[in-house]
Amino acid sequence: MHETVLLNEAVRALITTPSGSYIDGTFGRGGHSKAILKKLSPEGSLLAVDRDPEAIICARKIAEKDSRLKVYKGLFSELPLKTQVAFQVEVDGILLDLGVSSPQLDSSDRGFSFTKNGPLDMRMDNSEGMSAAEWLADAGETEIERVLRDYGEERFARRISKAIVEARDLSPINTTRELSKIISDAHPSWEKKKHPATRSFQAIRIKINSELKELSKLLDSVLDLLVIGGRLVVISFHSLEDRLVKRFMRDMSRGVSIPKEIPMEDKLINRRMKLLGRPIKPSKSETEINPRARSAIMRVAEKIN
């Protein structure tokens, strides 16, 4: 069962006017979108975006019954064009719930989980691009090491990449179970309460789906999509995503760097956003119900210029 993380907190932070236009940039199975629609007036509208074909099927079923919902299958980087087509105006808020949804993890056919055996795929949209199995079959040992280190922050990246290359030279790595065992056997130090393949699977998934590149592209254009007073709400699940979001919001809220003793108006500093409150993490009760929420962190910023 899919439990939407920080549901009430995210919707409360996002909606400033019930008659406004909003974007759910990561529809998933629609937990946030359904809650947003409940808060919108008949004049409000919502654009739901996802690259996962199964998520889009779910979104279109809702859209058939609610004309306020528009649906688009695509990437973060395509949002500026789709927003212009859907609304023809800037929007009042954008919500991003990053990472993999529970249905994706729970389906062995998708290849995201190291605890379920299935084809080694890991694509958010399995109709496009290279699967994890195909990438691992062709990538050099140095490239695999770099991906594990940079995207998984895996300190044993060299040892694991060497083991992967040695294993594939004997036989193709086609299933999640095969890859999980190779990583586990190569891992010299297992973290408490964390499977040894966790970081490597995360790293390969990020690589296959260009997740950080897509997020960076959207952040580069997000201010062009928001009205003055419009809000960006982002829920991250690992430090690499959160670092990008934190840095972007911080830089946009600071503007041009000048000495503190020099008084200057915001418009001259070019301060574009203000941070709203401190980062929010799930409550103890939420993490007890949904352990996958433990690593979530939500940041909110509002466009001011």
Image: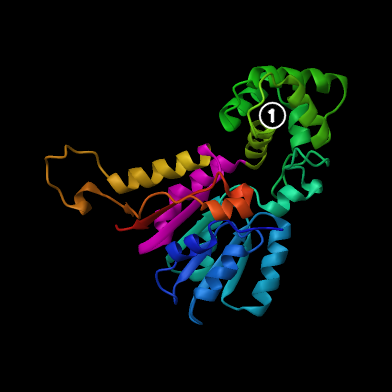
Kind of residue indicated by mark 1: Pro
Q: Quadrant of residue 116?
A: top right
Q: Quadrant of residue 129?
A: top right
- Residue at which label 1 appears: 196
- The image shows residue 80, relative to residue 173, as above or below, that is below
Q: Residue furthest right?
A: 171
Q: Position of residue 90 (x, y in %)?
A: 42, 65
Q: Residue at x 79, y 28 (%)?
A: 181
The magenta stretch is 210-239
Q: Is residue 228 magenta?
A: yes
Q: Is residue 108 magenta?
A: no
Front residue (pair 291, 251): 291
Front residue (pair 157, 90): 157
Would you say residue 127 is visible in this rendering? no
Q: Residue at x 46, y 48 (%)?
A: 219
Front residue (pair 152, 5): 5
Dot 1 falls on a residue whose secondary structure is loop
Q: Position of residue 198 (x, y in %)?
A: 67, 34
Q: Is residue 203 left or right of residue 81?
A: right
Q: Position of residue 253 (x, y in %)?
A: 31, 48
